[in-house]
Amino acid sequence: MGLAGTIIVLDQLTKAWIVAMFRLGDAVAVSAFFNLVFVFNAGASFSFLADAGGWQKWFFIALAFGISGWLVVMLRQHATDRLLASALSLILGGALGNVIDRLRFGAVVDFLDFHWAGVHFPAFNVADSAISVGVALMLLHQLTHKEAP
């Protein structure tokens, strides 16, 4: 669970830096395909339910806490399986990092903006990255792990 804690700290430090250095809506070009931006996302991935009227904040907080509880149980059951434990820890840290934002700001701070040929991928953050990598590792584990009969 140390990995989850590390993700939470990195996520919150990067978001604190963005909030301190940028005004909401600001964008700074870093390269031809990457910007730093400051946006709030009241929804889930790809701004799903962002305009739902406010109820989604509590829904996503409750969902994240429920999933986090399940992840902790799974971590205890699979503590010796390094790949699965790492995957679960990344997802746990990312979920709780975004919950902190929802409780503090009512929305998640996003700031990484990748684009190509005028098309922007939805902005995201360290927590989102950890969740995505964790899910990919969980899928890899499922594809490579053989259950004992």
Image (cartoon, rainbow, N blue to C red):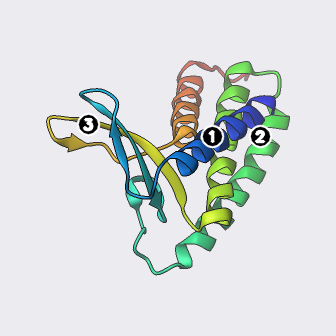
In the rendered structure, which amino acid carries the disc numbered 1? Asp
**Are the residues flagged by discs 1 and 2 in contact, CB closer than 8 Å?**
no
Nearest to the eye among marks 2 and 3: give it.
Answer: 3
Relative height, residue 108 to residue 126 (above, below): below
Q: Residue at x 26, y 37 (%)?
A: 115
Which image quadrant is residue 116 in? top left
State left or right for residue 119 relative to residue 78. Answer: left
**Are the residues flagged by discs 2 and 3 in contact, CB closer than 8 Å?**
no
In the rendered structure, which amino acid carries the disc numbered 3? His
Which residue in the structure is indicated by mark 1?
11
Q: Secondary structure at mark 2?
A: helix
**Label ID, residue 115:** 3
Pointer 1 or 2: first along the chain:
1
Categorize mark 2 by other alpha carbons within 10 Å: few (<14), some (14-19), many (20+).
some
Q: Residue at x 73, y 36 (%)?
A: 4
Q: Residue at x 54, y 63 (%)?
A: 107
Residue 123 position in % (x across, y down): 39, 46
Q: CA distance from mark 3 to mark 1?
A: 22 Å
33, 128: nearer the viewer? 33
State left or right for residue 48 relative to residue 65. Answer: left
Q: Residue at x 47, y 63 (%)?
A: 43
Which residue in the structure is indicated by mark 2?
74
Q: CA distance from mark 1 to mark 2?
A: 23 Å
State left or right for residue 148 relative to residue 79. Answer: left
